[in-house]
Amino acid sequence: MFDAIIPLRSGSKGIKDKNLIKFRGQLLVNFTLKKLLKIKEINRIFILTNSGSYKKKIIKNKKIDISYPRPKKLSKDNSNVNNLIEDFIKWSESKFNIKNLLLFQVTNPLISIREIRKSLKFINKKKKQSLFHVSEMIEAPYECINKIGVNWKLLSKSFLVNRQNYKKYYFITGSMFYFSKNFFNKNKKIFTKRSHAYEVDKINFIDINTKFDYENAKLLFKKKYRN
């Protein structure tokens, strides 16, 4: 079994209170929660928020726990998620028997139940201690530069004209992170180079931080397009 955690911080700047924007007729956070509640392998869902108003708007369910008091010092723009997880684990030790944790971000709404279940099945089968979702890059580094204006540099060593010669590159989608409590206590990080990079559908590149991301997420979900 797994326990899920969802960090929710109020005061986002790209889109004000982006965790509470409407998606498919409901709050973005509740859209994610309803999805996770359908996955029987998830035992509990912990909401890590500093906002009392957020807690009031979260759907009620016996699997959802909002009792963690997220400290103000871990609720800032530059707060490190690893520090937040460390604080949460310390808080939970006297209250819950947590062994395996899944971290989800509500700003990645296009991850499907099917892909989450496949990921959990893989974790159990391969006995993984840490795993995170990746997707093939939409734009290869052969076509990317480090800045605008002059004196820019390619991110790769050379420019390739023919796409068939491109190597595959991947980016971390943020749609799901898995780590055992033992793994985190040992490394103080949710993933390291020894963590398994697990490929999911390219549609998961969406992470809602801007209005452009938000509109793209709505369009892609409506089309239900997947590779």
Image: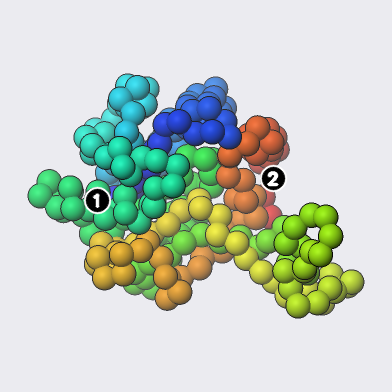
Q: Is residue 190 above or below residue 29?
A: below
Amino acid beneath label 2: Tyr
Estimate the x, y position of residue 108 in percent, counting from the top left. 53, 44
- SS type, badge 2: loop
**Residue 142 left/right relative to 63:** right
Q: Work out which residue is located at the far front of the displayed protein and give it.
A: 151
| Nearer-the-camera pick, 74 or 62 | 74
Q: Counting residues from the N terminus, which is met first, the one under dot 1 or under dot 2? A: 1
Residue 47 visible here: no
Between the residue at mark 1 and the residue at mark 2, the CA separation in whole angstroms equals 39 Å
Estimate the x, y position of residue 118 in percent, counting from the top left. 47, 58
Residue 10 visible here: yes
Estimate the x, y position of residue 121 in percent, counting from the top left. 41, 62
Mark seen at residue 87? 1
| The N terminus - image quarter | bottom left
**Residue 136 left/right relative to 5:** right
Q: Residue at x 60, y 50 (%)?
A: 204
Q: Residue at x 51, y 53 (%)?
A: 174
**Residue 156 left/right relative to 131:** right
Estimate the x, y position of residue 6 in percent, counting from the top left. 37, 43
Q: Residue at x 65, y 32 (%)?
A: 211
| The C terminus - image quarter | bottom right
Q: Tell us which disc is closer to us: 1 or 2.
A: 1
| Nearer-the-camera pick, 100 or 186 | 186
**Residue 224 left/right relative to 53:** right
Q: How is the image coloured?
A: rainbow
Q: Is residue 144 above or below residue 81?
A: below
Q: Which residue is mark 2?
A: 225
Q: Residue at x 17, y 47 (%)?
A: 91
- SS type, badge 1: helix
